[in-house]
Image (cartoon, rainbow, N blue to C red):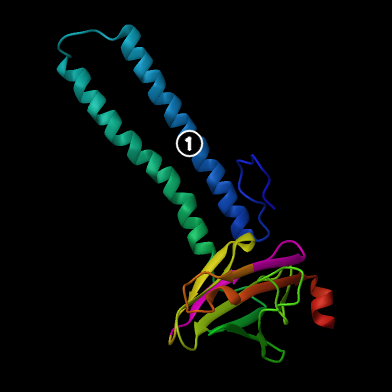
Amino acid sequence: MTHWGGVNMLDGFSLIVEGLIQFNDYVVGLMVCIFWFVILLMLCEVVWGSSGDRDLNVVTILEAVWTLLPMILLLFMAYPSLILLYLGDEQGGQVLSVVVTGHQWYWDYSVMGSEDFSSYMESDSGFRVLDVDNRLVLPIFTGVSVLLTSSDVIHSWAVPSLGFKIDCIPGRLNHFILQIIKGGVYYGQCSELCGAMHSFMPIVIEAVSIEDFIVD
């Protein structure tokens, strides 16, 4: 939940979101270091800089430094970013598979080992335009392989607190790995302009313990 005056990202409830939050803090720290480094260089130039022509060797060294230093910084940012990118599509270790199919204007879910069901917006709920009649129930601390497609137009299955926004494209299967780390109810909505009823196809994921999931 957001609070007035907050500057940090929202709490994450999946492994990917936790990684994104750490990566954000890491990059912001690098930005602060770069900012104060540049300010320090400017102050040094103003206070101790000499006027007139520069020595050619000094200029050459300066050119090399301000070319190599940004390249090194980009490598430090690219490495953790690529790790997060590949972790979201890591194969193996998943014990549950879910197929998500977008329709105008509702969702179909097919969970391995259980019956298929449809999820429509529930207008009588206390959360207007956010709750549904049939929630997708998933276990926590379990790798879930999610396959997404659409039967008509492009939809987008998105739950911000779980860190995913994946397009559902007709005739194509998109894939990602989801692992929820805390029980609760997570809300999302279609994030693609899929038609006149676009705003009326919410997503609700209920995360429960593995014991409760097996019993249900």
Quadrant containing the C terminus is bottom right
The disc labelled 1 sits on which kind of residue? Answer: Leu
Identify residue for label 1. Answer: 30
Q: Position of residue 93 (x, y in %)?
A: 63, 73
In this rendering, position of residue 90 left or right of residue 161: left
Residue extending farthest bottom: 115
Q: Position of residue 56 (x, y in %)?
A: 15, 18
Mark yes or no: residue 89 visible.
no
Q: Position of residue 141 (x, y in %)?
A: 72, 66
The secondary element bearing badge 1 is classed as helix
Res 163 → quadrant: bottom right
Q: Residue at 46%, 87% (x, y): give it.
A: 152
- Answer above or below: position of 41 versus 64: above
Residue 168 within the segment the image draws in magenta: no
**Within 10 angstroms of label 1, few (less than 14), some, or many (20 or more) residues?**
some
Q: Give the camera-side residue of 24 and 200.
A: 200
For the record, the magenta segment spans 172-187
Q: Residue at 34%, 8% (x, y): give it.
A: 47
Q: Residue at 46%, 35% (x, y): give it.
A: 31
Mark yes or no: residue 161 visible.
yes
